[in-house]
Image (cartoon, grey):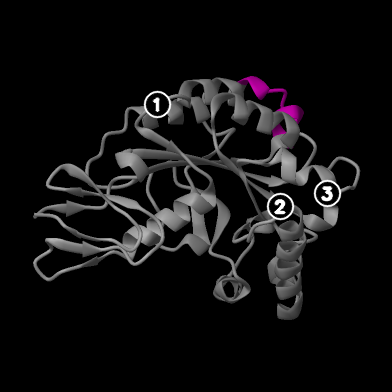
Amino acid sequence: MNIKFDLFPGGKKKALTMSYDDGQIFDRELVAIFNRYGIKATFHLNSGKLDEEGFVSSREVADLYRGHEVAVHTRTHPFLDCIPNEAVVEEIVDDRKHLESLVGYPVKGMSYPFGVYNDKIVNMLSGLGIEYSRTVITHHDFYIPENFLTWNATCHHDDDLIETGRRFLNYEYDGKLKLMYVWGHSFEFDRNDNWNVIEEFCSMMAGHDEIWYATNISIVRYVKALRALEFSANGDIVYNPSAISVCINADNKAVEIEGGQIVRLR
């Protein structure tokens, strides 16, 4: 039997996720655009900057980002490689605690302030409850990372976004999960006077039946559940030990395996 892990929920062949940092007031317009087109995003916030001039307020966080994901960007946005280990822990855990008190769910994602990280920092994250962290490195491809704690995006929104989006829509490489991951800062649209770019991109990407529109953490949890599947020696029986339903490609047929379910594939 030919088994491939190349399907997202519902048998969809592609996924799109967006990732935006800092929580400045321009997130309000960006969220409105995403909501208009059904695009899902993750917003990485510095809880220590909330309520400051130019940043969103604590009281609006839950409603503003509802339907999206709120994630860690540290409490005060330091260079993490230039502070003691104890301060790194405090920056991340304090940010998690404050954000969780606002949104009412476990905050498990992160992006590195200034894109700065090293092996020491990466190795600390799992112990601090972080399941993934985005870098500022881009690869202009559509693959899933092996290590979500050093998650590189497809592109920044100022880096040929429309052309990359068109390429993604036409991308038909078989046998792999296909993800487009866009990152940036909402203030850049205001600074560069190019809100039209993200509006055009969202309009172009919206409404495709083959695309799963997902937050960063949804992608991570799905892929981890997919990788955790347990197969019989013959490959004809599969057990899903997770609580998340996943889809696999079995002899070119989409098969859903619900959480906790054992499925005979033939």
**Relative to 30, is 128 above or below?**
below
Badge 1 vs badge 2, beta-carbon distance below 8 Å: no
User: Going from the N terminus, do you reach mark 3 or mark 2 first?
Assistant: 3
Q: Secondary structure at mark 3?
A: helix
Q: CA distance from mark 3 to mark 2?
A: 10 Å
In the foreground, 62 or 39 = 62
Q: In the figure, is residue 135 to the left or right of 96?
A: left
Q: Amino acid at mark 1?
A: His
Count of numbered tags:
3
Can see residue 141? no
In the foreground, 151 or 31 = 31
Q: Amino acid at mark 2?
A: Val
Seen at 44% across and 24% down, the residue is: 207
- State which mark lies toward you, 3 or 2: 2
Whether residue 235 appears in magenta in the rendering, the answer is: no
Q: Disc 2 designates what residue?
A: 103
Q: Residues within 10 Å of mark 2 (few under 14, many from 20)?
A: some
**Relative to 20, is 260 above or below?**
below
Q: In the figure, is residue 239 to the left or right of 241?
A: left
Q: Residue 93, position in %: x, y?
A: 71, 69
Q: Amino acid at mark 3?
A: Ser
User: Going from the N terminus, do you reach mark 1 or mark 2 first?
Assistant: 2
Q: Disc 3 designates what residue?
A: 58
Q: Disc 1 designates what residue?
A: 208
Residue 73's tag is none
Q: Which residues are magenta?
A: 187-196
